[in-house]
């Protein structure tokens, strides 16, 4: 195969210029710049809040959660910065890949970054959900076994797994390819040549869907356990406040990930396993753009769903509905508490019940 034929296979046919193409290009560049700017600002702001909260919290389970949350926001920040810069670089050369990337090096880097910064948030979210599930249902085991060193090793393993999946096409000599819009690179999706072309995108999609499923299961069970324990008064004076805050954030992250990443992961599976002549009813680029909103919305979960903001929201609902939410307001006051005296009424209510001698001996 000649070099011209190889370049045509890797990059596809050249896109002819026209007025509509130029307008579409300008809109795409503008949308990329706006998405990159908003993503960098949002994640930087959320990272500042999380680092500030991490530095002043001494509760072990809260510190572990903030470590993973800060890592998730940092990953989203780098994803917007690196992927956005690559997109702008491609548009700078008018999407003529054979001119500025004749050997496919930039395309492989682009594909690795797309997969790594796409899969990492999903894996981190699932790890956070598992950690919070253990913290809510098995607090003693969480404190005794899940040390800070183990949490950092788990964080490194999560990044390593995402990097391995991203590097698989390069290691197996199945390089990433420029997609139809010629503005980004991804797996070889059209007319797979053999089982490897089917397996590589399937690994990415199945792993992402399993991470979403694990997040849904763990977050649901942790929320039910927290609600059941609160209603049965099993948590006593312990940190119900920050448990509720973290569960609300995890549920929001789970919802955002399912809405943004679900269509892309399912669509990649459909494209990988469909017949060669079967038409695609949904654009792959559209699902990718939906997935990028996950990295924009994730930081706002930590910005908006903080304890102080949740308390103000509950107070606003109470002031609007008055006595109809009196019982619910008492519940949220005892749960969220004030920032100075968390769960004070809850502690006073159950401080009358002394601990049995066996419990005192086991604690001491």
Image: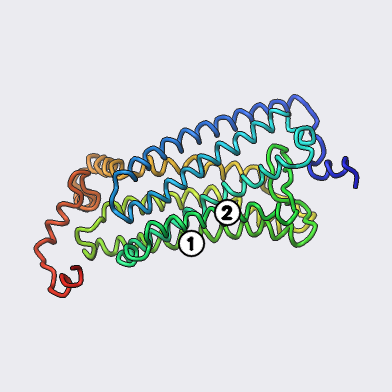
In the rendered image, the vertical position of residue 249 relative to residue 132, given as above or below:
above
Front-most of residues 46 and 145: 145
Q: Label 2, secondary structure: give it.
A: helix
Looking at this view, name the residue that lies furthest to the front.
149
- Residue positioned 30% across, 66% down in the render: 140
Image quadrant in which you'd find residue 107: top right
Q: Residues within 10 Å of mark 1 (few under 14, many from 20)?
A: some
- Gap between marks 1 and 2, in whole Å? 16 Å
N-terminal of the pair, mark 1 or mark 2, is: 2
Looking at this view, name the residue that lies furthest to the top.
19
- Residue positioned 33% across, 56% down in the render: 61
Disc marking residue 162: 2
Q: Label 1, secondary structure: give it.
A: helix
- Residue positioned 79% across, 44% down in the render: 10
- Residue positioned 66% across, 59% down in the render: 202
> Is 200 displayed left or right of 17 in the figure?
left
In the rendered image, the vertical position of residue 138 relative to residue 86, given as above or below:
below
Front-most of residues 282 and 264: 264
Disc marking residue 214: 1
Looking at this view, name the residue that lies furthest to the right.
2
Determine whether label 1 and label 2 are within 8 Å by CB: no
Disc marking residue 179: none
> Is 188 displayed left or right of 338 in the figure?
right
Looking at this view, name the residue that lies furthest to the left.
352
Q: Residues within 10 Å of mark 2 (few under 14, many from 20)?
A: many
> Is 5 displayed left or right of 165 in the figure?
right
List x then y, in percent, for residue 98: 79, 36
List x then y, in percent, for residue 81: 55, 36
List x then y, in percent, for residue 304: 37, 41
Q: Check the picture and name the quadrant holding the C terminus.
A: bottom left
């Amino acid at each position: 195969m000649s070099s011209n034929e190889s370049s045509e296979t890797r990059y596809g046919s050249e896109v002819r210029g026209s007025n509509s193409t130029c307008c579409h290009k300008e809109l795409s560049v503008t949308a990329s710049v706006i998405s990159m700017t908003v993503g960098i600002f949002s994640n930087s702001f959320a990272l500042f809040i999380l680092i500030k909260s991490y530095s002043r919290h001494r509760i072990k389970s809260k510190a572990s959660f903030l470590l993973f949350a800060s890592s998730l926001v940092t990953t989203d920040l780098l994803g917007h910065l690196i992927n956005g810069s690559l997109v702008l670089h491609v548009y700078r050369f008018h999407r003529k890949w054979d001119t500025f990337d004749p050997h496919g090096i930039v395309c492989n880097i682009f594909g690795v970054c797309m997969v790594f910064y796409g899969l990492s948030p999903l894996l981190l979210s699932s790890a956070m959900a598992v950690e919070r599930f253990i913290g809510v249902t098995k607090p003693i085991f969480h404190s005794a076994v899940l040390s800070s060193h183990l949490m950092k090793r788990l964080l490194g393993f999560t990044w390593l797994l995402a990097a391995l999946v991203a590097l698989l096409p390069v290691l197996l000599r199945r390089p990433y390819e420029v997609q139809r819009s010629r503005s980004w690179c991804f797996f070889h999706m059209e007319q797979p040549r053999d089982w490897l072309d089917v397996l590589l995108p399937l690994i990415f999609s199945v792993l992402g869907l399993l991470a979403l499923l694990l997040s849904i299961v763990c977050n649901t069970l942790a929320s039910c356990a927290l609600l059941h324990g609160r209603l049965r008064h099993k948590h006593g004076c312990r940190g119900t406040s920050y448990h509720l805050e973290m569960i609300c954030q995890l549920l929001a992250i789970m919802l955002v990930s399912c809405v943004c990443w679900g269509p892309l992961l399912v669509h990649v599976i459909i494209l990988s396993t469909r017949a060669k002549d079967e038409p695609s009813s949904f654009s792959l680029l559209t699902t990718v753009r939906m997935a990028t909103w996950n990295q924009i919305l994730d930081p706002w979960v930590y910005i908006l769903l903080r304890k102080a903001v949740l308390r103000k929201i509950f107070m606003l609902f109470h002031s609007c509905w008055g006595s109809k939410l009196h019982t619910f307001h008492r519940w949220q006051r005892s749960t969220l508490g004030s920032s100075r005296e968390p769960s004070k009424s809850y502690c006073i209510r159950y401080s009358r019940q002394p601990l049995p001698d066996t419990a005192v001996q086991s604690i001491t």
